[in-house]
Amino acid sequence: MKTIVVMGRGGTGKTSFVSLITDYLLKKGEMPLLLVDLDPDQSLGEMVGVDLEAEGKKSIAELLEDTFIGKGGTLSGISPSERIEQRIWEEGMYEGEKFDFIAIGTKWIEGCYCMPDTALKEALGRLTKQYRYMLVDAPGGLEHLNRRITADVDDIIDVLGPSAKSFAHLERARRVAYESGIHYRRFFSVGGFLFPKALEYRAEKIEDIPYLGRISYDEEIARRTVEGEPVLGLMPVHPGPASVFRVMNKLGY
């Protein structure tokens, strides 16, 4: 199984990029896929056509709250992740024909993600199903990366936005990955749909982080996002999918 982690500051088009990578791999017949949404906004599900609530599924944070607050469970003794792992597979995993989907959910106790992160990390470490790819939509913050949700990664891709903070995030993400002991094969950057062409030279100059190009703005993707419609299935003539096709080809996928 190959693992691709996509990260970047909020508003860069990161989740749209993950959705279009999903679409690209599906069109190539690279199935089954596992999509992991670590972003508290939980917009990835909407963009790939999965409504966990409508499917009778729960996020990991919801399962933890239900187990340790709703059902009055104790945090002592057996580890919380072991206690809810079976529930993650039975109640938290959306299983589709072409891809499966799981979400970390929103913060659950006093704004802390520690326990949901640990539960997901240990559950993913014991996956038995053979996926071709795992795609991880990571949030703007680096706490999930720091807690090593997945310690073995093929590619990390940071999506740049039109600000100096995006470049700072990129450098910080590389440092956190190294300091956390995450084993990754390659580290790249791409420009989000708002990333100005005038800043591409700066991205290209960053040592040891190859720049893959910009993701094109796509009016149909923008419309679908506003309407809450999935973005999968667009023809490659659309600028968004076409630009992701070029990026994925550069990556060798």
Image: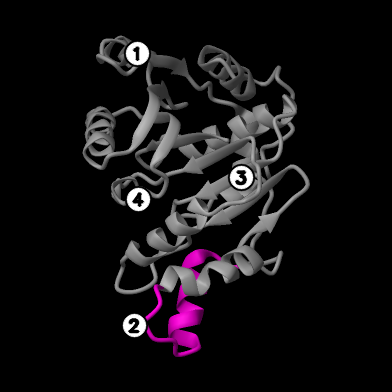
Image quadrant for the C terminus?
top right
Secondary structure of the residue carrying tag 1 is helix
Q: Nearer the viewer, mark 2 or mark 4?
A: 2
Q: Is residue 75 left or right of residue 243?
A: left
The stretch in magenta equals 58-79
Q: Do the residues labelled 3 and 2 touch (CB within 8 Å)?
A: no
Q: How crowded is mark 1: few (under 14 residues within 10 Å), some or many (20 or more)?
A: some
Q: Determine which residue is flagged by label 3.
A: 34
Image quadrant for the N terminus?
top right
Q: Which amino acid does label 3 sit on?
A: Leu
Q: Determine which residue is flagged by label 4.
A: 144
Q: Which of marks 1 and 2 is nearer the N terminus?
A: 2
- Depth check, front residue: 46 or 143: 143
Cα–Cα gap, marks 1 and 3: 31 Å
Q: Nearer the viewer, mark 1 or mark 3?
A: 3
Secondary structure of the residue carrying tag 3 is strand
Q: Name the residue located 67 percent from the left edge and 57 percent from the top edge.
A: 94
